[in-house]
């Protein structure tokens, strides 16, 4: 009941935001489901945070930018391409396997097996950078690690989920919220949020793009995402709150 009430209230708030064309939001792929709930009428471009930041640097037009890492919004802010970013959510990184776990992966220790096929986010993609930080922490002191065969480096987290769900890889690193959104197609084998030395917690930031065509709607969307009601929707999707 609480979730239905919140979503209805959000719909009423957003109904008052229109009038000047569609709001354009560039956002990290892991925000796909939750942002579409928050504003079903907006135009979204979901992709890797790094790719979206690069597009803005090259002159692409958007009203709002939301990233799975502070790295890119802070860089865009220094370049005067977005307004001051704010943290609105957190996420944790998990190791996933296909449903049924055909590779018998039991955790990070299984990545020492050269028979395990591993898929990561590409370098620069936040989920890929977080995964490499986790592996670096786990492998500290080992001469060769991991021995798992990296079969793909994906441009966003949805690509990692898809590869694992289809059985094209035996394991991959994604966000906890992506497991929930996958609807049982993948399983989380190891939650890494408690491993402070691996620093796997993702911090999400959002900002209005400078020169936004729909600035009023953009400001209202950011206010909604960072509001208590927006927090309820984020929490229901599995995100942590700052």
Image (spheres, rainbow, N blue to C red):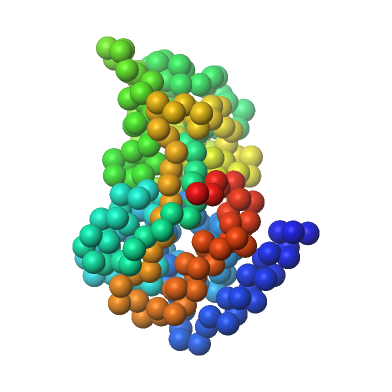
Residue 118 point in image, percent of width and height: 41, 29
Where the N terminus falls, by quadrant?
bottom right
Q: Is residue 239 above or below residue 136?
A: below
Which residue occupies the foreground of this view, 44 or 152? 44
Q: Is residue 36 visible?
A: no
As drawn, is 54 to the left or to the right of 121?
left
Residue at x 52% of width, y 83% of height: 18
The part of the image, by quadrant, that contains residue 113 is top left
Q: Is residue 61 above or below residue 128?
A: below
Residue at x 23% of width, y 60% of height: 78
Q: Is residue 123 visible?
A: yes
The part of the image, by quadrant, that contains residue 76 is bottom left
Residue at x 45% of width, y 33% of height: 172
Which residue occupies the foreground of this view, 75 or 60? 75
Residue 20 point in image, percent of width and height: 46, 86
Residue 8 point in image, percent of width and height: 69, 70
Residue 11 point in image, percent of width and height: 63, 73
Counting the numbered discs, the total is 0
Judged from this view, the residue extending furthest toward the bottom is: 19
């Amino acid at each position: 009941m609480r979730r239905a009430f919140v979503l209805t209230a959000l719909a009423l708030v957003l109904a008052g935001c229109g009038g000047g064309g569609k709001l354009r939001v560039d956002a990290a792929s892991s925000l796909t489901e939750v942002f579409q709930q928050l504003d079903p009428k907006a135009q979204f471009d979901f992709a890797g945070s790094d790719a979206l930041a690069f597009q803005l640097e090259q002159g692409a037009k958007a009203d709002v930018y939301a990233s799975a890492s502070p790295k890119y919004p802070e860089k865009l802010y220094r370049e005067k391409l977005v307004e001051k970013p704010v943290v609105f959510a957190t996420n944790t990184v998990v190791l996933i396997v296909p449903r049924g776990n055909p590779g018998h992966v039991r955790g990070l220790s299984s990545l020492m097996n050269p028979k395990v096929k591993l898929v990561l986010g590409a370098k620069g993609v936040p989920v890929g950078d977080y995964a490499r930080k986790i592996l670096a922490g786990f492998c500290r002191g080992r001469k060769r690690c991991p021995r798992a065969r990296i079969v793909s480096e994906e441009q966003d987290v949805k690509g990692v989920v898809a590869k694992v769900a289809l059985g094209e890889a035996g394991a991959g690193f994604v966000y906890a919220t992506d497991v929930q959104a996958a609807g049982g197609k993948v399983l989380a084998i190891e939650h890494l949020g408690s491993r402070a030395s691996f620093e796997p917690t993702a911090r999400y930031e959002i900002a209005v793009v400078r020169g936004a065509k729909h600035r009023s709607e953009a400001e209202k969307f950011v206010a909604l995402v960072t509001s208590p009601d927006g927090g309820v929707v984020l929490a229901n999707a599995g995100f942590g709150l700052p």
